[in-house]
Image (tube, helix red, strand yellow):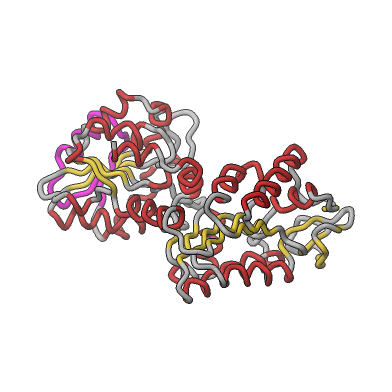
Amino acid sequence: MKTVDSINFSNKRAVIRVDFNVPLNEKFEVTDTTRIRAAIPTLKKILKDGGSIVLMSHLGRPKNGAENKFSLKHIVGEVSKQLGTAVQFADDCISDEAFAKSSALKNGEVLLLENLRFYKEEEKGNEDFAQKLSKHGNVYVNDAFGTAHRAHASTAVMAKFFGAEAKCFGYVMAGEVASINKVLNEAQKPFTAIVGGAKVSDKILIIEQLMNKADNILIGGGMAFTFVKAMGGHIGKSLCEEDRLETAKELLNKAKAKGVNLYIPTDAVIADNFANDANKKESAINAIPDGWLGLDIGAQSAKQFGEVIKNSKTILWNGPMGVFEMSSFENGTKQAAFDIAEATKNGAYTLIGGGDSVAAINKYNLADKVSYVSTGGGALLEYIENGTLPGVQAIES
């Protein structure tokens, strides 16, 4: 894999696709700097070589051109702070002024372009738009793993306007791809995948792919209730995808046929309302009373899952065990997070991917107690499903 380490950026202007799609509060302040911090080592390497940098990113999902709340001008201060270098800003990404600013950059200087998605051409993968963006630099670096699964102009098309010697991956991309390969292609056994979240439909393909690799698959979160109902259980008013009951049955049968241990929770923390202060109690997961809904895995399931996790050598975690944002229903997710940290301490390789799993690891201050925390949830899932990504192929082809 060709990374920024293979290029000397002295007197070169690198145009870098980063993923600075970060959350902002009502005052337009960055509330989570994870993605910005992740890109800093790549940027510092280029500046240390004596190069200059043009940064490209998207922010949010603007519908009709430029919108103030999606402007990247709001993050200039935070990027400057994290990088330790004043960052200039261009209030467009392909205007004459933007090109004037990028071409005037001196070695050691950094320019951030305005939100790429203010142009519909970005998401359409428009070639003319990609070619215009390519004029901002003489080396192309893709360090935006979080968008590498999108065949957008800046992630999958731009690379064709640079020769093989003038395009590479940043450290974020390289680290992400290496960590996924370690889990999917070099996994030490036993390999356990923990899959949570609300919907089976979101995770069908990933569960099917993981059945070819994993020894154990632990199912948690709202999606567990679809499996429980498919097995004939009574789930009260818990979340359930009625149109996916047959799919759940098929997955259970496939796991059995492949000799994969597919663990479904046996008990749940249930509530009479979707609220932190609701009345709650524990129940067998297949005998939830009418009017009650499951919002977390129960203590028995958390213990069973923990034993599997702690006996594993490779672990992939995608999706929470319950509604961990509410303190009353966070125990299953919290327990899984600490069990994964313990497994890591004992030598397991652990990859955390997906927004909610990453949020949980950060909530419990365990990011430095696991092997790798992925910055791209959707990209990680798609990589597992397809074996590659448009943004990866664009550099490697």
Q: Residue at x 70, y 41 (%)?
A: 247
Q: Residue at x 35, y 37 (%)?
A: 155
Observer-nearest residue: 223 or 10? Answer: 223
Does residue 306 appear to the left or right of 161 in the view shown? right
Observer-nearest residue: 204 or 279? Answer: 204
Task: Specify start and end residues of the magenta stretch as a single range.
Answer: 87-111
Does residue 246 appear to the left or right of 183 in the view shown? right
Observer-nearest residue: 160 or 383? Answer: 383
Residue 69 in view: no
Residue 308, placed above or below residue 292 = below
Q: Residue at x 23, y 57 (%)?
A: 44
Give the image quarter of residue 292. bottom right
Q: Is residue 130 magenta?
A: no
Give the image quarter of residue 148. top left
- The image quadrant where one finds the C terminus is top left
Give the x, y percent position of residue 222. Answer: 70, 52
Give the x, y percent position of residue 82. Answer: 32, 60
Give the x, y percent position of residue 283. Answer: 83, 64
The single residue placed furthest to the top in the displayed view is 128
Q: Is residue 100 magenta?
A: yes
Q: Count numbered badges in the picture.
A: 0
Give the x, y percent position of residue 205. Answer: 58, 42
Does residue 1 appear to the left or right of 357 in the view shown? left
The single residue placed furthest to the left in the displayed view is 11
Does residue 238 appear to the left or right of 259 in the view shown? right
Residue 151 in view: yes
